Image: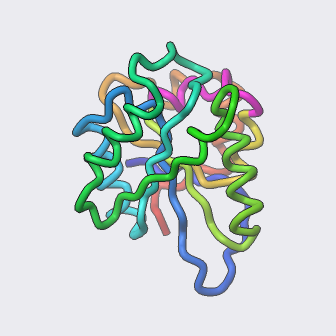
Amino acid sequence: MNPASAGVQSRAPGARLLAWFGGTFDPVHFGHLRAAEEAAMALDTEVRLLPAQTPAHRPQPQASASQRLELLRLALAGQQSLLLDERELHRDGPSYSADTLTELRAEFGAGTPLALIIGADAFAGLTGWHRWRELFDLAHLVVLDRPGAAGPDGWPQALRQQVAARRAESVQ
């Protein structure tokens, strides 16, 4: 796991990091769960899986939102460190991370550190996301290594520039 730190947030005394791992989860599989579990251990926090209603950057899911939600509930049964956050499933239109993080920032305040966990393949395409630069001001971006995903040399120049001053090799 490669924590690419983001926002210039001042942590409130005793504030615990809150983390979200988004995706279509069509269907949820062991790779999703294992990545989320490893992130929870590395970050010493619970990770909330955040299924997208209408993904903006990939084909529409084959399973309905209610089917994917039920599969996630079954997959997370008995998990201690993995939770489910349904907020994007109750929203109309595309599921934009910037909108969700803005909502989370308003809900938890500026002093609570937030993290968005994404795969290295998705991170490499971040410049195509809606309001992508804002993500860095709203949360820490935790990038999960994935086999075959482009490293920093393969990222667009604009993304390399955004990350240059923010990159952290350690969770601390």
Identified at 67% across, 21% down, the residue is: 128
- Give left or right: position of 16 versus 67: right
Could you say which is closer to the camera, residue 1 or residue 98? 98
Tell whether position 123 is magenta. yes
Q: How is the image coloured?
A: rainbow
Q: Position of residue 102 (x, y in %)?
A: 75, 50
Q: Position of residue 3 (x, y in %)?
A: 48, 52
Could you say which is closer to the camera, residue 140 or residue 59? 59
Tell whether position 133 is magenta. no
Identified at 62% across, 66% down, the residue is: 113
Q: Position of residue 33 (x, y in %)?
A: 29, 46
Q: Position of residue 19 (x, y in %)?
A: 51, 58
- Give left or right: position of 32 versus 129: left
Res 37 quadrant in image: bottom left
Res 25 quadrant in image: top left
- Give left or right: position of 43 versus 56: left
Residue extent of the magenta highlight? 121-131
- Vertical placement of 152 versus 103: above or below? above
Res 105 quadrant in image: bottom right
- Give left or right: position of 83 versus 37: right
Q: Main secondary structure of the magenta part?
A: helix
- Vertical placement of 115 versus 131: above or below? below
Identified at 77% across, 61% down, the residue is: 106
Could you say which is closer to the camera, residue 112 or residue 61? 61
Identified at 30% across, 28% down, the residue is: 147
Residue that lies at the very extreme toward the bottom in this rendered image: 13
Residue that lies at the very extreme toward the top in this rendered image: 59
